[in-house]
Amino acid sequence: ISVFDHVVRAPEDPILGVILTHLPCSLCVRLSFLNFPVVVTVAYNKDPSPAKLNLGVGAYRTEEGKPLVLNVVRRAEQMLVNDSSRVKEYLPIVGLADFNKLSAKLILGADRLVYLHGTSPAIQENRVTTVQCLSGTGSLRVGAEFLARHYHQHTIYIPLPTWGNHTKVFGLAGLSVKTYRYYDPATRGLNFEGLLEDLRSAPSGAIVLLHACAHNPTGVDPTTHQWEQIRQLMRSKALLPFFDSAYQGFASGNLDADAESVRMFVRDGGECLVAQSFAKNMGLYGERVGALSIVCRTADVAGRVESQLKLVIRPMYSNPPIHGASIVSTILKDRTMFQEWTIELKAMADRIISMRQQLFDALRGRGTPGDWSHIIKQIGMFTFTGLNSEQVAFMRKEYHIYMTSDGRISMAGLSSRTVPHLADAIHAAVT
Ligand code: PMP
């Protein structure tokens, strides 16, 4: 009898669950069910219909439905392989120094930067500490562990709804997780009054998780004017901003525009945390490349904070992996490669934006009842369609279209070829 006999089977992660290993066919590898509930995945997989459509994918896909490795990433990898002076030694606890410096510049930047030129005053004043972490998730976790040990307030407010992992990451780090109102199903937009009200009644000093851009899963972001009001309210109550930046450049196609929310909070001289991911914007999903930056009041505080971040990281995984961070720093430190990256990044963002327009036009063309303008207003990879679970089930049964039951569809999973089929299905579901 096993000493682990009492161990009960945990439920599959609804997001990452069974990926690929249980589904070895080449089709599954192409479709890669990241971010898709397992039950739906299995049903999709079994569906023999040639018209079937998977709109649950949480990673970018080309017009042909294939994963994309950016040309500039391939080139950077080739350069790394060809450089015989490169070795496989351990990185420092905080990761690759160049990567950290460039990542901080990328997110904090200046107002209008051309190839990382203008530099944020916070960086110039040496009051930002940046540590390389395991993609966005690892950066959030390290930040959360640090706050649980060294910050006086242990309550964190996350938007309702939010990316499902937030609750677990912050809860397991020892923070107490509360929500603030965010999405309004009636308008399929931001519940701005609810948001302000909830932040106004939060205890002074509470941590607030903010999606820097392209809110997941709703695709709804505050306007610049609303961000300014959020900033004023948060600063007046000493609420601590913790930005999750998983889609910089991927939302609008412009790296600066997508970082504006973070930069507004840095410009006022106050403190904040930023978790950055290079999964989406460089297509480095499996390389697990990310960074946590903590913007402090003074260089002295930043130095002390960094020393404590090392104590968080060392017993967790000692130091981060070298390959993905080397790809990113190779690209960010070379002007030509950086520019090449921005072009490829914009092409991904533009394809998603074009899918929004095509779907919107197709519904208008069919005279589908309802206001579908939220499809073109929402931002980033996902659209919160507003379809209810019965309509989602109907579309699956009758049209072989698969999405999460909350009606969220991945625009990256659509192509010009499949838009008409989706529009037909939505039309039938709501009429
Ligand atoms: N935050 C948000 C809002 C996300 O959508 C994701 C990815 N789905 C992440 C963080 C983390 O992703 P990763 O750890 O792959 O960088």
Image (spheres, helix red, strand yellow):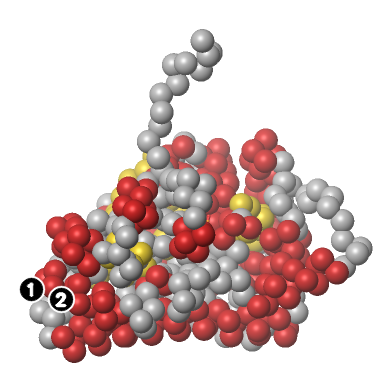
In this rendering, does residue 326 appear at all? yes
| Disc 1 residue type (three-letter) | Thr
Residue at (67, 72) in percent of width and height: 73
Label 2 to label 1, Cα distance in Å?
6 Å
User: Is 308 displayed left or right of 9 in the figure?
Assistant: right
- Image quadrant in which the C terminus is located: bottom left
Q: Nearer the viewer, residue 191 or 320?
A: 320
Residue at (41, 24) in percent of width and height: 8
Occupied quadrant, residue 341: bottom right
Residue at (76, 60) in percent of width and height: 97
The residue pinned by badge 1 equals 431
User: Is 419 displayed left or right of 372 in the figure?
Assistant: right
| Disc 2 residue type (three-letter) | His
Q: Are marks 2 and 1 in contact (CB under 8 Å)?
A: yes
Q: Position of residue 395 (x, y in %)?
A: 20, 64
Residue at (71, 67) in percent of width and height: 327
Q: Nearer the viewer, residue 360 or 168?
A: 360
Q: Position of residue 277 (x, y in %)?
A: 56, 62
For residue 427, the mark is 2
In this rendering, does residue 308 appear at all? no
Few, some or many residues within 10 Å of mark 1 (<14, 14–19, 20+): few
Q: Position of residue 142 (x, y in %)?
A: 58, 46
Occupied quadrant, residue 361: bottom left
Few, some or many residues within 10 Å of mark 2 (<14, 14–19, 20+): some
For residue 15, the mark is none
- SS of the residue at dot 1? loop
Q: Residue furthest right?
A: 85
